[in-house]
């Protein structure tokens, strides 16, 4: 079997005796299967709380400043339903992205017993992470925040307080998409509200005073514009990464491509599930990745 050239970004060990398995001790209390995944990072938790606060602030302004005081009930009901549905899907996607194991490699599995179970042959290569003492599958990278190696790690996002990896990339993509949609929807409603208030008496445009109404709308406009740009760029970047089957880290480090090249459609199905359905747009539908190629510890 061909040997992979040494890569200066990864710790390559060619023989099991050089892996120093005696230094790798499994954690005393391994995480039980099915347990909730949550990263205890102060910065990430603060960013996640800010994310929810900004969405709820937008909800408050849209409902209590623009829609409820409006005398056009059809306009208020339709826009209220659409905005609340998109906001609900955005927050649900945020929760799934934050609380789903992104593809963590078992910590401390570089033990003598595990290495012997791989039945390495001469010329085969395994990757050991010296930080979490794990045998790394191909395309896995170590996250210093999660303190774990993550399969197909794209990046660590503080806004979802989690890594974006093999198992939760779908939810992150949906989160960026729905945030971009509610931001665009809010900006459109703010524009119509300003036009309506300029034509009518400002005191009849909202249950709040005119200065308070203007301040709330300007803040919402600034928030919507900022997040529309940011999440649209992130959404486009993620879709491009999925279609090319190359994570952000792999693009940044210009890593040599050692995996089979597939069509863009197959790459999309590998992330969102087989086959194509409305479940692709639902944060409650777990992707069926049964046909995806399993990761390998040895090559």
Image: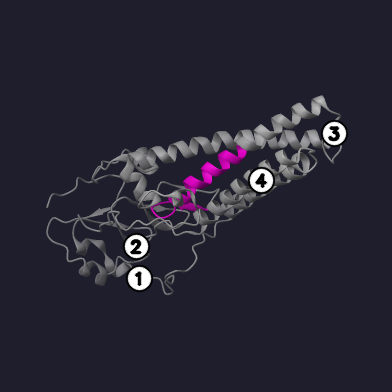
Total marks in image: 4
Depicted 146 relative to depicted 195: above or below: below
Q: Which label sits in the foreground, 4 or 1?
A: 4
Q: Are marks 2 and 1 in contact (CB under 8 Å)?
A: yes
- Residue 80 or residue 270, whichever sits in front: 80
How far apart marks 3 and 4 lie (CA) works out to 22 Å
Q: From the image, tell me which residue sits under label 2.
A: 133
The disc placed on residue 25 is 1
| Residue bearing the label numbered 4 | 54
Q: Which residues are magenta?
A: 161-183
Residue 110: where, in percent of width, then height? 30, 65
Q: Nearer the viewer, mark 3 or mark 2?
A: 3
Work out whether residue 237 or residue 18 is closer to the camera in this orientation and state it: 237
Q: In the visual, does 285 lie left or right of 203?
A: left
User: Spatial distance from mark 2 to mark 1, Cα to Cα?
Assistant: 8 Å
* Sequence-earlier tag: 3 or 1: 1
Residue 249 in the image: above or below residue 49: above
């Amino acid at each position: 079997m061909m040997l992979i050239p040494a890569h200066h970004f990864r710790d390559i060990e060619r023989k099991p005796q050089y892996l120093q398995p005696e230094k790798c001790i499994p954690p005393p209390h391994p995480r039980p299967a099915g347990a909730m995944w949550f990263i205890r990072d102060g910065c990430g938790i603060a960013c996640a709380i800010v994310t929810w606060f900004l969405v709820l602030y937008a909800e408050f302004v849209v409902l209590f400043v623009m829609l409820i005081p409006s005398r056009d009930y059809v306009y208020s009901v339709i826009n209220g339903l659409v905005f609340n549905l998109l906001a609900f899907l955005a927050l649900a996607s945020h929760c799934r992205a934050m609380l789903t194991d992104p593809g963590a490699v078992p910590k401390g599995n570089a033990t003598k017993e595990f290495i012997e179970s791989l039945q390495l042959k001469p010329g085969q290569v395994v990757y050991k992470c010296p930080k979490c003492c794990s045998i790394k599958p191909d395309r896995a990278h170590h996250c210093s925040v999660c303190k774990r190696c993550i399969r197909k790690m794209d990046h660590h996002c503080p806004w979802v307080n989690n890594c974006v990896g093999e198992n939760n990339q779908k939810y992150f993509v949906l989160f960026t998409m729905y945030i971009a949609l509610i931001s665009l929807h809010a900006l459109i409603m703010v524009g119509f509200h300003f036009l309506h208030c300029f034509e009518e008496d400002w005191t009849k445009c909202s249950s709040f005073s005119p200065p308070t109404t203007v301040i709330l709308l300007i803040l919402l406009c600034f928030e919507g514009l900022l997040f529309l740009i940011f999440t649209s760029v992130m959404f486009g970047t993620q879709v491009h990464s999925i279609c090319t089957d190359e994570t952000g880290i792999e693009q940044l480090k210009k890593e040599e491509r050692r995996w089979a090249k597939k069509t863009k459609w197959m790459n999309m199905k590998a992330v969102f599930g087989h086959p194509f359905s409305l479940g692709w747009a639902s944060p409650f539908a777990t992707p069926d990745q049964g046909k995806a190629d399993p990761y390998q510890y040895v090559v």
